[in-house]
Image: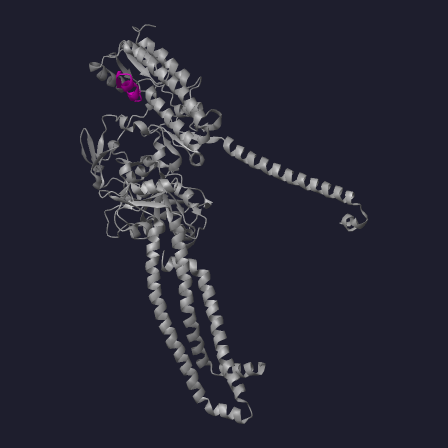
Amino acid sequence: MLDTFYIAWRYVSFNKIKTATLVACVTLISFLPLSLQLLLEESERQLMSRAVSTPLVVGAKGSSLDLVMNTLYFDDEVPELITVAASNRVMDTDLALPIPVYARFQARGNPIVGTTLDYFDFRGLKIAQGRQLAVLGDCVLGAKVAETLGLEPGDSLVSSPETLFDLAGIYPLKMKVVGVLEKSHTSDDLAVFVDLKTAWVIQGLGHGHEDVTKLRDPTLVLKRTEKNVAATAKLYHHNEITEKNIDSFHFHGDLAQYPITAVIAVPHDDKSGTILRGRYLSQEETRQIVRPEDVIDGLLQNIFRIKNVLDAVISVVALATILAIILVFALSLRLRQREIQTVFKLGCRRATIARLLTAEIFIIVIMSGVFCGAMVFLVNQLSNDLVRMLFIR
Amino acid sequence: MEYWSNGKGLTSSMRMQNIISVSKGLAFVCFSVVTIASLMLFSTATADESEKLTIYVVNYPLQYFAERIAVEHARVVFPAPADVDPAYWMPDEKTISEYQRADLILLNGANYAKWVNKVSLPRFRMVNTSAAFKDRYIETAEILTHSHGAEGEHGHEALAFTTWIDFSLAAEQAEAIAKALSRTRPALRDTFQKNYEELKRELLKLDRDIKEVVSKEQSRVLVVSHPVYDYFARGYGLNIRSVHWEPDEIPTTAQMVELHTILKDHQAKWMIWEGEPAKEAVERLKTIGIQSVVFDPCGNAPNQGDFMSVMRQNIENLKEVFPQSRW
């Protein structure tokens, strides 16, 4: 038996190119559906686990998918804005606890998530280094952001302007990195967390500047009347919040009218959740309340429909490849007719020749299996990151 | 084992005795295990129930109310130093993190404690004790607006925030505290409610007492040394005008001029001070026919006594201002 495998091995190693081609074909044909299945399972797990752990999301009426993807995975597509009043409304019902989320801005390609400290308790996020958000201008980094940007507590991170061409617009805010979160293997690893009020400062709704009523430099005052002092554009706005200038930072108007992208509502129990959902059913209602689980489930149904098409395509390609491999073997046998005849004339039985050919096929299949197994193992190891990179974020 | 293996030579009664004694031993072990486990469970539950709540507050009246309602079930902390005005105090990072870890954070509302808007606190554990009467907040007049950038004209809106010196509002704030405590420790709801009722009775008595003091001459005009008496004035129908003087400072000439301007159409004979005024300030006021009286809002912890005793003293002091009453 070993002799058969030895001769078969000598043959396949002598015909390197042919063997490599056959191994590559078999490997790819078996790897593609397996890895696709793995990635889809992982994406389903990731999407669903976060969706299931987020009971309800309140946002502006419109695409529920955009709302959920932005609130749960901090997707770039920002849903229509709502106000803090929507969060207060949830609080006032006494049916659920609201966690406002404002995921609109970015810092060096990473989403800045403005929220309250309750978010960290809700998601079970722990500080690995440094401390929790404390004052205006502080930011806490997700584990992956800190790793990628090489930042640690004490460093600073500048928010990115929304558009490059808004030269007269809001200046970026230099945020102070005060903490890094423990790795959670969720979208939180890829986010920069700030207090909701800091997000409003980034937007320019809250700002710090000299007291305009006490300005002495005449070039800073456009017009001064008994009731109003109008400052010129020269008035310097602080782009970093420090201990020295924090007192000058202020917000105008009613904070309840300030923007957020969504509210995560955590109902006290199932009954409260159902009652709360019922409150958003009216036709005149400008907000929507969604169960992320339902939205993501709908998304996955679509993904699986696409997967079925992909499976069919892969099956056809696999069939064609197998036929091609059979053809290769058949042609190879025809080419090796004289060689087989010689072996036969040397006294080998037909069964021995058949065993030799089977051993060659077996070696190719085993080699393909090993390569395929190694590649699937690699995909499995990297599936978490691959799914975030390819499908989620 | 050896005992059992030699069992062949034992009588059946001895065997029975052995079985009974082993069974007894097993029963005892089982009983002990069950008892210890039950005791452990019970003690854990009791520890959970009896664990003190940690409550952080932003001013002394809230500390007093919370302590009166929660009594031994909470540790109420008001970390502002004794010599600062808590409304304008800014806690350091360590204190902010203590606030963040508290089971409850009691806020006064009406923009009291400006620092609250500049720090991150857990919203679920924050209680705005004046939320129930936010439609009755008093906006302070004469806001100087300003404009810059694309925002247009805007003012840094100001709300009067010394809500608790209208004792009916103080009672509402105490009610909010009682409700928040009951939500946090439902098992102690009755205790909290009982303590709140008692506190409410005392606060409403203060309310009645002041009304009685001022009722005889409600039209009397007063000047107050600090703009913190808006709720007090509204609650008890007093006609006040405010200057901005510190009790430990001698009024400057400009401040005296400002007072004279006020007095032209507001002929007050008394000035209400937040704290004991400097002698020279009192004398200077006397020269223009104005007497001084202290009504301490008690925003920070008093050196002596407590909220109730300070307020009772305030009412006593007010009797000088309204002498026609029947004391």
Q: Nearer the viewer, residue A176 or A104?
A: A104
Q: Nearer the viewer, residue B156 or B162?
A: B162
Q: Going 40% across and 17% down the picture, which residue do you hit?
A: B308
Image: magenta residue range: B226-243
Of all residues, the one furthest to the bottom in this rendering is A345
Residue A345 in view in this figure: yes
Give the colour scheme shown.
one colour
Reply above or below: A230 against B269.
below
Report the residue at 39% width, 76% height from top: A321
Q: Give above or below for A16 relative to A236.
A: below
Q: Is A220 placed left or right of B198 in the picture? A: left
The number of discs equals: 0
x and y, in percent, of residue A235 in the image: 25, 39
Residue A202 location (% of width, % of height): 31, 44
The quarter of the picture where the N terminus of chain A appears is: bottom right
Q: Is residue A181 left or right of residue B24?
A: left
Would you say residue B237 sits in the magenta stretch? Answer: yes
Measured from the top left, where is residue A225 in percent x and y?
Answer: 17, 30
Visible residue check, residue A109: no
Q: Is residue B256 magenta?
A: no
**Place of residue A380 in the rendered image (x, y in percent of width and height, measured from the top left):** 45, 62
Q: Quadrant of the C terminus of chain A?
A: bottom left
Residue located 38% across and 54% down the image? A47
- Where, by quadrant of the figure, is residue A21 drawn? bottom left
Most distant residue in the front direction? B12
